[in-house]
Image (tube, rainbow, N blue to C red):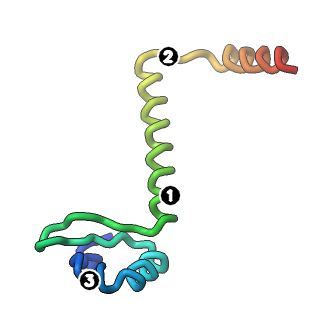
C-alpha cells in the first residue's frame, strides 16, 4: 500500500474530523498527517490498530521462542507432555 495517497495536512483534519474518522473506519487505511509540510503522525481506525498490536505480540512471541531454541532452552516433547500431565494430576 502506498501511503502517499493518504496524506492530509493537520488543518484538513481539524476542519473535517468527522469525515476523516468515517473514511478511516470504511477504508481501514491509515492516514498520514502533515504539519508544515512534514509528516508528523499516522492515524488509523481502532480495529486496524488492535490487529496491528496483536500481530506484533505474536511476532514477539515467535522471536522469543526462536531465541530460546538458539540458546538451547529446549526439551524433548515426551518430557514436556509428562510434566504437563503430572501437573494436571496434582491439581485434579
Q: Which residue is mark 2?
A: 73
* Mark 2: secondary structure: loop
Q: Nearer the viewer, residue 3 or 53?
A: 53
Residue 71's x, y, as percent? 41, 17
Residue drawn at x 45%, y 73% is: 28
Which mark is in front, 3 or 1?
Answer: 3
Q: Nearer the viewer, residue 53 or 60?
A: 53
* Mark 3: secondary structure: helix
**Residue 76 against residue 19 in the figure, above or below:** above
Residue drawn at x 12%, y 73% is: 37
Sequence-wise first label, 1 or 2: 1
Residue 74's x, y, as percent? 53, 17
Residue 1's x, y, as percent? 33, 70
Residue 13 placement, left or right of 29: left
Q: Which residue is mark 3?
A: 12
| Separation (CA) of disc 3 from disc 1 | 27 Å
Disc 2 residue crowd, few under 14, some 14–19, many 20+, Cα 10 Å: few
Residue 27's x, y, as percent? 44, 78
Which numbered circle lies on residue 51?
Answer: 1
Sequence-wise first label, 3 or 2: 3
Q: Residue furthest left?
A: 36
| Separation (CA) of disc 1 from disc 2 | 30 Å
Which mark is in front, 1 or 2?
Answer: 1
Amino acid at each position: 500500500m502506498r501511503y502517499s495517497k493518504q496524506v492530509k495536512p493537520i488543518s484538513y483534519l481539524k476542519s473535517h474530523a468527522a469525515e476523516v474518522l468515517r473514511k478511516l473506519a470504511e477504508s481501514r487505511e491509515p492516514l498520514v498527517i502533515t504539519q508544515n509540510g512534514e509528516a508528523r503522525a499516522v492515524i488509523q481506525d481502532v480495529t486496524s490498530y488492535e490487529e496491528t498490536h496483536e500481530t506484533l505480540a505474536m511476532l514477539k512471541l515467535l522471536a522469543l521462542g526462536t531465541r530460546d531454541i538458539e540458546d538451547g532452552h529446549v526439551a524433548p516433547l515426551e518430557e514436556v507432555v509428562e510434566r504437563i500431565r503430572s501437573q494436571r494430576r496434582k491439581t485434579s
